[in-house]
Amino acid sequence: MPLPPEFHEIAKRVNNWGRWGEADEIGTLNLITDDVVRDAAATVRTGRRVPLALPLQQDGVQTGIVPGRVNPLHTMTQINYEMFGPGTVAISDDAVTMGLQAATHWDALTHVSHSGVIYNGRPADTVTAHAGARFSGIDKAPYIVSRGVLLDVARAKGLDRLPADHAVSPEDLDEAAEFGRVTVAPGDIVLVRTGQVQVFLAGDRQGYGFPSPGLSVHTPEWFHAHGVAAVANDTLTFEIIPPEIEGLWLPVHALHLVEMGMIQGQNWNLEKLSTACAQEKRHAFLLSAMPEPFIGGTGTPVAPVAVF
């Protein structure tokens, strides 16, 4: 089924190809300037730190719906091995096999394509079996530190968790910004809380992923207008599933990653952050969300930390 005219109309309005030059591979991360980072650091007042990652574990969020995207399989390769002889210092080592998008993660700009292209109009076949992504792999995003802004859509509506059929709209984002008394500015990293991760934390892995609240196909224009550098949320699918437009799967992925060049994150645990923002009486903070520099990777696990 070809992408509908509505998708292409939105794509034209949010497209950033060539905005930072033909050679650009990081898209909206260009908006995180030295000045933005300095201002973000100035938000730190108490030093309170809030972790936002889910544990990397074998019974994690992945249920097998995406072939090959496996939860972390942790194996001990050495246990108290006296490699220099009896009585010497012993070592223990381990190894992990996992999908790079297995748990809390960033999607690289090459995670999806549409119409045969990736961000900045490059051919989709530059993502190869042996080398991974030739352009815009996650390794091209060496640092992601900026002001983080929590848009607590659920709390703004007086809810602990959004209903599974709720598509987060631009109006919802405005309402959450007003609720948090925060103005989203260019270079910000926006975290959108739906409360859906509570389903996983309660032990319902299947119910966590489908059906799920998530971002509406109309929200990319909101992020584009506000100059958002990156966005993450607390769901498996990121966008509303089942989709708003019948047959149009993952349109928000395509608009963010391909058209805008804006990385996005999934499976972020925003529950403790919601509590901290309420206690601190502010919804902006310094956010460190450094990607692991997998060469050619189309995603990466991340352990984000909000600092107040």
Image (cartoon, helix red, strand yellow):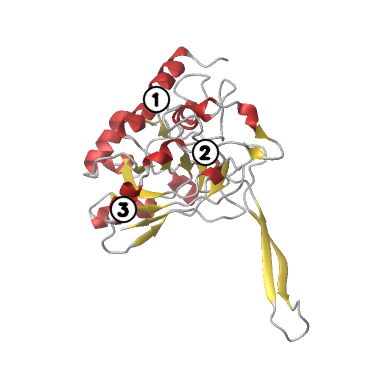
Check disc 1 and report the residue beneath it: 14
- Which SS class for mark 3? helix
**Which amino acid, mark 2?**
Gly
- Which SS class for mark 2? helix
Eye-nearest disc, 2 or 1: 1
Q: Considering only order in the chain, which callout, 3 or 1, is on the residue closer to the N terminus?
A: 1
Q: Which image quarter: residue 128?
A: top right
Tell me where residue 157 appears, x and y as whole percent.
27, 38
Check disc 2 and report the residue beneath it: 209
Q: Are marks 2 and 1 in contact (CB under 8 Å)?
A: no
Q: Considering only order in the chain, which callout, 1 or 2, is on the residue closer to the N terminus?
A: 1
For the residues labelled 3 and 2, the Cα–Cα distance comes to: 37 Å
Tell me where residue 288 appears, x and y as whole percent.
41, 54
- Which SS class for mark 1? helix
Tell me where residue 224 appears, x and y as whole percent.
36, 30
Eye-nearest disc, 3 or 2: 3
**Which amino acid, mark 1?**
Val
Q: Label 3: how many residues lie within 10 Å, few (<14), some (14-19) or many (20+)? A: few
In the image: residue 259, left or right of residue 57: left
Residue at 27 percent across and 39 percent down: it is: 176
Residue 303 in sight in this render: yes
Check disc 3 and report the residue beneath it: 38
In the image: residue 169, left or right of residue 250: left
**Which amino acid, mark 3?**
Arg
